Amino acid sequence: MVRYTQEHKQETRQRIIATAGRRLKRDGIDGSGVATLMKDAGLTNGAFYAHFASKDNLVDTAIADQLDTLHTNIVEQAEPGLAGLEQIVRWYLSPDHRDDLGGGCPNAALLDEIARSGDTTRQAYTDGVLVVIDGLAARMTPEDPLSARVKALSLLGLMAGTLQLARALTDRRLSDDLLAQGLRNALALVDPELPL
């Protein structure tokens, strides 16, 4: 029997989480079985339970990880203030993001399923999305944090809904036009003075 180091186990666990996050965003929670998720990670089904108690446990962990990645790679990397918020909005409502189901934001890909999930999944989502929201809100109106948080939630809702609808349309031109209008709407919410 081969014994793996703790570091190897942690790397394997992280690989499962990352590949599961991409698959969940592409195929949804219900459309992603344990066998597929493990195959994506290059592992057998038998290895699953060495890392997770259940599929729900993996889903909760993957959603939290995807939101952390969104916060770290997009929100934290943008410029400070309104300029950074504009960068985030322009990335979110871009054709590239629309077309990148597996690498994009978990909000647009999974919100409908998360809303129908159990309490632990919804809590994992809530905890993760509030970090993202607070990162957006900090770029808005720091003198009124509560108002900025609600405004940031509205902004994320507008962007996620627009992206979901743009992804669902078969008419590419209509989808592009929707993204452009969503971008104008989102930028107006961010700051009515921003040039569109």
Image: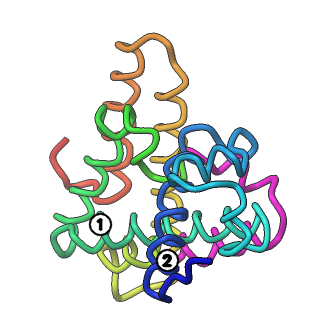
Question: x and y percent of residue 66 in the render?
Answer: 49, 63
Q: Is residue 74 magenta?
A: no
Q: Quadrant of residue 50?
A: bottom right
**Residue type (three-letter) at the residue carrying disc 2:** Ser
* Image height of 117 relative to 136, above or below: above
The answer to the question of whether label 1 and label 2 lie on touching residues, with beta carbons closer than 8 A, is no
Question: x and y percent of residue 48 in the render?
Answer: 68, 64
Left/right placement of residue 184 relative to residue 155 reads left
Quarter of the figure with the N terminus: bottom right
**Secondary structure category for the residue under label 1:** helix
Mark 1 or 2 closer to N-term?
1
Viewer-closest of 116 and 37: 37
Q: Which residues are magenta?
A: 109-130
- According to the picture, the residue beneath numbered tag 1 turns out to be 73
Q: Main structural element of the magenta stretch: helix, strand or loop?
A: helix
**Secondary structure category for the residue under label 2:** helix
Compute the Cα span from label 1 to label 2. Answer: 25 Å
- According to the picture, the residue beneath numbered tag 2 turns out to be 147
Q: In percent of the image, x 55 and y 74: which residue is there?
A: 128
Question: x and y percent of residue 131 in the render?
Answer: 48, 78
Viewer-closest of 167 and 80: 167
